[in-house]
Image (cartoon, grey):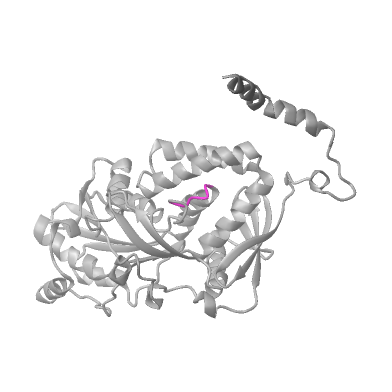
């Protein structure tokens, strides 16, 4: 043991965080604990834990958090129909508080005084990490190497060579990409011109919609209290369910989003997202809610959903307001149980069938055919009462 203070580093195994191990040791005289967290991103080509140790970390671990991500972050967001600015299903945003939570837990366990992450000063993620950490343990200090050092990619590689840091330098990608179970985000490069259509290279998951199969694919999704539990009659855990729907949606070109969004830091950013499973499951969930929830609940919940989405996007997941809104949302899901059939075809996902033991759709009231149970005589009296305020006002205004 060195007797130095410890810092927990959010570690991906990429160039930035590999270099950060040595930088944190030299700059702050800290012992580095490297922590990789699996929320569904593609696996590394090597053992990043072993490489972190070879690069000087005193301890390294890789935490599989996919199950927790689904149950405690994705499903609450799905029940909230969480779409930031009615476009983005928050795939990256809702993973950050989970990562912050695990970093704090490990820092507390290891007696570390600091946590470090690789976020830049222009993005939202720095806010989500920093606010998440201080919301869970305000005694922990935060260091953002990418906010302090000013090194280009080439300078980082040279720094690694000078300090015998083992790195895997991949072919330089013109885009900045983040991936997890709930979606893939892509920015930078040609996408910074908001007029330019995203090139094929910007999409990494989904089939080009025009090249998707010419025959529609149907998927039946079963929900219990707002949470999907089965696909085409087969019960699945959350991780497998999302992966299964993802594969179906991807091959049918479903889930592409091109959005200019308002970042928390005050700038507009053009990003593309691929959220195949999120798009399909959100479509199905909303359809089931329309079948099972009363009109006033749907109308009020819409405002709650928007606020929930803003809170999650802005990094306030662990705040009292998000927790309170979640309690309301959970209450609305008591009867959101049933099955929805979704048609996937060349980039579109459309709910084309739905059923529920708690359905509020009464065919006897809705039909215009034989068997109509609606009391037609009541319509005149209802319309009289409904229109009476306007009728009264019209009389008064006409006199004036």
In depth, the one of 139 and 56 nearer the eye is 139
Identify the main secondary structure in magenta. loop
- 83 is within the stretch colored magenta: yes
Could you tell me which residue is drawn at 62 percent across and 62 percent down? Answer: 350
Q: Give the range drawn in magenta.
A: 80-84
Total count of labels: 0
Taking the image as shown, residue 2 lies to the left or right of residue 274, namely left
Let me know if residue 259 appears in the view: yes
- For the C terminus, give its image quadrant: top right
Residue 239 in view here: no
Q: Which residue is drawn at 25% across and 57% down?
A: 117
Q: How far from the left and from the top, in percent, is residue 279?
A: 53, 61
The quarter of the displayed image where residue 15 is located: bottom left
What x and y, as percent, mark residue 83?
47, 52
Residue at 18% across / 56% down in the picture? Answer: 147
Residue situated in front as seen by the camera: 216 or 196:
196
301 with respect to 88 (left or right): right
Q: In this view, does 394 lie above or below 22?
A: above
């Amino acid at each position: 043991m060195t007797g130095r203070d410890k810092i927990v580093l959010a570690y991906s195994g990429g160039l930035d965080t590999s270099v950060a191990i040595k930088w944190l040791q030299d700059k702050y005289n800290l012992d580095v604990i490297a922590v990789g967290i699996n929320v569904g991103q593609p696996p590394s080509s090597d053992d990043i834990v072993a490489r972190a140790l070879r690069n000087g970390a005193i301890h390294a671990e890789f935490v599989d958090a996919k199950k927790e991500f689904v149950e405690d972050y994705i499903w609450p967001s799905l029940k909230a129909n969480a779409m930031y600015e009615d476009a983005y299903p928050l795939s990256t945003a809702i993973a950050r508080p989970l990562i912050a939570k695990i970093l704090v837990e490990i820092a507390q366990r290891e007696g570390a005084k600091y946590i470090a992450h690789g976020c830049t000063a222009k993005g939202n993620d720095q806010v989500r990490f920093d606010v998440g950490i201080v919301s869970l343990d305000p005694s922990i200090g935060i260091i953002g190497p990418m906010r302090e050092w000013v090194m280009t990619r080439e300078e980082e590689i040279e720094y690694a060579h000078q300090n015998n840091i083992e790195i895997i330098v991949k072919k330089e990608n013109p885009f900045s990409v983040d991936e997890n179970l709930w979606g893939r985000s892509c920015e930078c490069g040609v996408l910074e011109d908001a007029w330019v259509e995203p090139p094929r290279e910007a999409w990494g998951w989904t089939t080009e919609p025009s090249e998707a199969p010419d025959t529609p694919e149907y998927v039946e999704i079963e929900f219990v209290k707002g949470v999907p539990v089965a696909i085409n009659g087969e019960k699945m855990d959350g991780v497998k369910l999302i992966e299964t729907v993802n594969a179906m949606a991807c091959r049918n070109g479903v889930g592409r989003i091109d959005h200019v969004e308002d970042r928390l830091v005050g700038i507009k950013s053009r990003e593309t997202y691929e959220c195949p499973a999120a798009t399909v499951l959100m479509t199905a969930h909303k359809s089931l809610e329309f079948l099972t929830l009363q009109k006033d609940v749907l109308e009020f919940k819409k405002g709650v959903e928007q606020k929930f989405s803003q809170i999650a996007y802005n990094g306030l997941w662990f705040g009292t307001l998000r927790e309170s809104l979640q309690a309301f949302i959970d209450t609305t899901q008591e009867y959101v149980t049933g099955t929805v059939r979704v048609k996937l075809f060349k980039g579109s996902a459309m709910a084309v069938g739905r059923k529920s033991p708690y359905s509020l759709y009464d065919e006897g009231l809705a039909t215009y055919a034989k068997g109509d149970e609606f009391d037609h005589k009541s319509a005149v009296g209802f319309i009289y009462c409904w229109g009476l305020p306007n009728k009264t006002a019209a009389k008064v205004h006409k006199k004036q």
